[in-house]
Image (tube, rainbow, N blue to C red):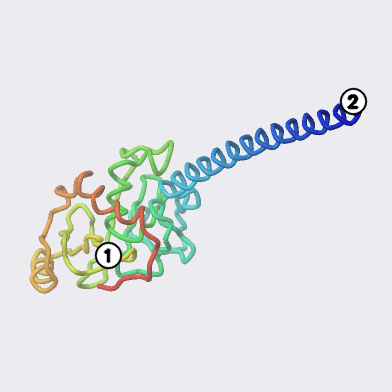
Amino acid sequence: MRALRTLAQLTRSRRALWLVALVALLVVASTWGWRSYRAAQAAAAVEDEYCVVAPPTAFDPTWGVGLLEARPIPPDARCPVCGMFPARNREWAAQLVFHNGDTQFFDSPLTLWAYVQDVGRYAPGRQASEIAALWVSDAATGRWTDARRAHYVHGSNALGPMRAGNLPAFAALADAQAFAKARGGAVLAAERIDQALVGRLLRPHRHAQMAAPGTL
């Protein structure tokens, strides 16, 4: 009988040890899973904020344009702010040219101004002082126009490439005013596009899935 009781006690002890080991394993697995989840979230947030596949495009003399002039958008060029392909939405596209001719292409005036206002964030090692020219697509004519002299319409019902207001640009003030009258919104000069406005307009983009390209 004593041997049986001893055997029963050993069995219960082993069960208790197995139970403790199982609980410890579950705790470790849960902790590891939570840390992995948080790490994945952090990585996704970083990826959402920065595009690591959009280096500047070096100047190519075969383009047939001057060093600082607007140039054709390569089909594989990507926007350094959102990662989209500007060539797919030429009517919204913009571009920035550095003094050495390197160019960044953007899917819209909005992402162009986001980049200009925080160059170091999207292009570590670059400075705003290196920027030589800014170009946006004239929504009325489709031609490239100086982004610093253009007129922009904020708050219209025209949805840009990411299905939100993207500040359609116009070379002529009269065209911008006519557009605002027909589609809503207010006309802004370039100097009125500040970080606060850009931040408000970009916020929905960073929390929504990319949708089908918009049209003017």
Question: Where's residue 88, x and y in %?
Answer: 40, 69
Question: Where's residue 180, x and y in %?
Answer: 11, 68
Q: Is residue 160 left or right of residue 140?
A: right
Label 1 element class: strand
Q: Is residue 43 left or right of residue 156?
A: right
Question: Where's residue 92, x and y in %?
Answer: 30, 66
Q: Residue at x 35, y 51 (%)?
A: 97
Q: Is residue 93 left or right of residue 20?
A: left
Residue at the spot of label 2: 2
Q: Which one is in front, 172 or 61? A: 172
Which label sits in the foreground, 2 or 1?
A: 2
Q: Is residue 93 left or right of residue 141?
A: right
Q: Around disc 1, counting alpha carbons within 10 Å, would you say few (fewer than 14), some (14 to 19), or many (20 or more)?
A: many
Label 2 element class: helix
Residue at the spot of label 1: 137
Q: Which one is in front, 38 or 80? A: 38
